[in-house]
Image: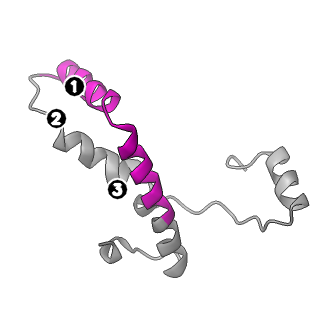
Amino acid sequence: GSHTHSDVINYLTEQRIKIMPHPPYSPDLAPCDYWLNDYIKRNLTDQPDEKSLARAVSKVMKKVPKEEFRKTFDKLLERMELCINNHGDYFEHLIK
């Protein structure tokens, strides 16, 4: 499928690593949904027009500290585990 490449599949098979299907889209597992959009909103001021807004969003995104990205992807691993433990059901309410 679109989320796999034959070289990767072959390697994982050779290493006897279980290949699981790509999960359906979930806002619980999408960093843009559970983190980035809120981060941008918190760091954005009112803008007079669409062009100014686009520039402001770009500026905020370029200034996101690397540590923020690292923490976000660490959280993604926790979220994946919650997703597995909840059999794919909604779990946002379980996050502290």
Disc 2 from disc 3: Cα separation: 17 Å
- Give the residue pinned by disc 3: 34
Image coordinates for residue 32, horizontal then vertical, percent:
38, 47
Question: Are discs 2 and 1 less than 8 Å apart at CB?
Answer: yes
**Badge 3, how many Cα within 10 Å: few under 14, some, many 20+?**
some
- Amino acid found under the numbered disc labelled 3: Tyr
Label drawn at residue 9: none
The answer to whether residue 94 is above or below residue 27 is below
Residue at the extreme bottom of the image, as rendered:
86
Question: Are discs 2 and 3 less than 8 Å apart at CB?
Answer: no
- Mark 1 lies on a secondary structure that is helix
The answer to whether residue 16 is above or below residue 89 is above
Residue at the extreme right of the image, as rendered:
14
Disc 1 from disc 3: Cα separation: 20 Å
Image coordinates for residue 73, horizontal then vertical, percent:
46, 53
Label drawn at residue 44: 2
- Give the residue pinned by disc 1: 56
- Amino acid found under the numbered disc labelled 2: Leu
**Badge 1, how many Cα within 10 Å: few under 14, some, many 20+?**
some
Please provide the residue range marked out in magenta: 49-77
Q: Residue at x 69, y 46 (%)?
A: 2
